[in-house]
Image (spheres, rainbow, N blue to C red):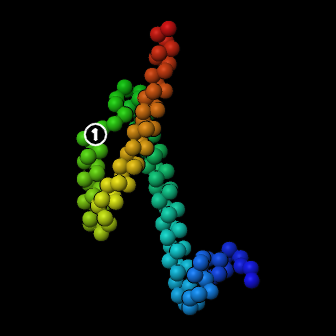
């Protein structure tokens, strides 16, 4: 029996055909919700990186350091408090934010390096 991507068998994954159809329907509905949340997270991260890219350009233009350790510490503590309020593991929230911060700093360092290159060429 073949199934189309929208059929309960395809959407139910490995458990399709082994569980009650009502359970499968609930599983499929919950997974659809998770898929929507994942899509929202991707778009929110894209917006966040657009904003941090503008910060990086501003920093590079004005010869500011790519990282701001004091702000990063404040943001991590703030996010951990928010995580606790939301009943999310604060350690997970910290790891997640550290991952994002590391990527932002990497982008800022690249912007800073690329803005310094023309100045080096001018010195020749």
Left or right: 62, with 20 as reference point: left
Q: Residue at x 60, y 76 (%)?
A: 13
Counting from the top left corner in percent of width and height, residue 85 is at 26, 66
Q: Residue furthest right?
A: 1
Left or right: 98, with 45 as reference point: left
The 10 Å Cα crowd at callout 1, few under 14, some 14 to 19, many 20 or more, is few
Q: Considering the image in quadrants, where does the N terminus appear?
A: bottom right
Counting from the top left corner in percent of width and height, residue 59 is at 38, 32
Res 116 visible: yes
Decide: is 14 above or below 62. below
Q: Residue at x 50, y 63 (%)?
A: 38
Decide: is 61 above or below 119. below
Which picture quadrant has residue 81? bottom left
Q: Secondary structure at mark 1?
A: helix
- Closest to the observer, 62 or 109: 109
Counting from the top left corner in percent of width and height, residue 36 is at 52, 68
Decide: is 90 above or below 72. below
Res 52 visible: no
Count of numbered tags: 1
Q: Residue at x 27, y 43 (%)?
A: 71
Counting from the top left corner in percent of width and height, residue 98 is at 35, 49
Q: Residue at x 29, y 49 (%)?
A: 75
Which picture quadrant has residue 106? top left
Residue pointed to by mark 1 = 69
């Amino acid at each position: 029996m073949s199934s189309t991507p929208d059929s309960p068998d395809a959407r139910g994954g490995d458990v399709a055909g082994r569980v009650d159809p009502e359970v499968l329907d609930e599983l499929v509905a919950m997974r659809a919700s998770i898929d929507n949340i994942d899509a929202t997270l991707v778009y929110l991260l894209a917006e966040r990186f657009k904003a941090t890219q503008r910060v990086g350009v501003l920093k590079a233009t004005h010869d500011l350091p790519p990282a701001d350790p004091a702000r990063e510490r404040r943001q991590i503590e703030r996010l951990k408090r928010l995580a606790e309020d939301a009943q999310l593991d604060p350690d997970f929230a910290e790891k997640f934010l550290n991952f994002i911060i590391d990527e932002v700093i990497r982008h800022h360092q690249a912007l800073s390096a690329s803005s310094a290159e023309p100045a080096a060429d001018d010195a020749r």
